[in-house]
Image (cartoon, rainbow, N blue to C red):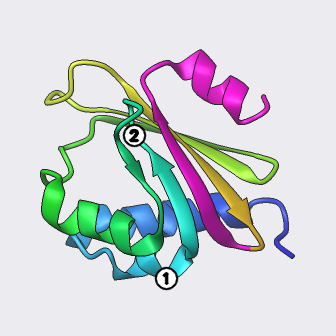
């Protein structure tokens, strides 16, 4: 069982490492085997850890330079928002945890929708 703040710490440490080094192995270690990642569009979905890691390493551009990051833990979810000069609108990811593992990620462009999905 995780205590309050643990999920936020997991997101900050793994995402920080990915930004700094480009390594995805630390993220892969906290992804549940059956994690789902819903992208911005219905057809953009990963249905397991291997698909998420493959997307991050083969099918997506490098992480853009970020000028603003917002993170908040809400129960078993963490909302991450970020802005970049190379992305026309802010992006948000709602990350759901179960017993310390990421089980679902949902990408959104609307802050209010992201926080609503997270239960705020």
Q: Is residue 80 above or below residue 20?
A: above
In the picture of the structure, the residue carrying the numbered disc 2 is 39
Quadrant location, the N terminus: bottom right
Q: Position of residue 35 (x, y in %)?
A: 55, 64
Task: Specify the farthest residue to the front.
Answer: 43
Q: Position of residue 62 (x, y in %)?
A: 14, 54
59 sits left or right of 70 in the view: left
- Give the quarter of the image for residue 40: top left
The 10 Å Cα crowd at callout 2, few under 14, some 14 to 19, many 20 or more, is: some
Quadrant location, the C terminus: top right
Callout 1: helix, strand or loop?
helix
- Give the quarter of the image for residue 19: bottom left
Which of the two discs, 1 and 2, sits closer to the camera? 2
Picture residue at 49% right of the left edge, 82% below the top: 29
Q: Is residue 24 above or below residue 110?
A: below
Cα gap from disc 1 to disc 2, whole angstroms: 21 Å
Magenta segment boundaries in residue numbering:
100-120
Q: Does the magenta run of residues contain 59?
A: no
Q: Foreground: 104 or 27?
A: 104
Q: Position of residue 55 (x, y in %)?
A: 26, 60
Picture residue at 26% right of the left edge, 76% below the top: 23
Q: Does the magenta run of residues contain 103?
A: yes
- Give the quarter of the image for residue 2: bottom right
Picture residue at 41% right of the left edge, 32% below the top: 42
Q: Position of residue 5 (x, y in %)?
A: 75, 60
Q: Which of disc 2 and disc 1 is earlier in sequence? A: 1
Q: Foreground: 5 or 27?
A: 27
Q: Is residue 63 above or below residue 43?
A: below
In the picture of the structure, the residue carrying the numbered disc 1 is 29
């Amino acid at each position: 069982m995780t205590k309050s703040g643990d999920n936020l710490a997991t997101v900050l440490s793994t995402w920080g490492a990915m930004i700094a080094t480009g390594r995805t192995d630390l993220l892969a270690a906290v992804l549940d085997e059956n994690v789902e990642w819903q992208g911005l569009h219905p057809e953009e979905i990963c249905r397991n850890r291997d698909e998420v890691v493959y997307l991050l390493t083969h099918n997506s551009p490098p992480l853009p330079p970020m000028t603003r990051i917002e993170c908040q833990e809400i129960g078993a979810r963490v909302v991450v928002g970020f802005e970049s000069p190379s992305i026309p609108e802010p992006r948000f990811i709602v990350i759901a945890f179960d017993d310390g593992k990421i089980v679902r990620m949902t990408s959104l462009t609307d802050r209010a929708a992201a926080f609503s999905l997270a239960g705020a």
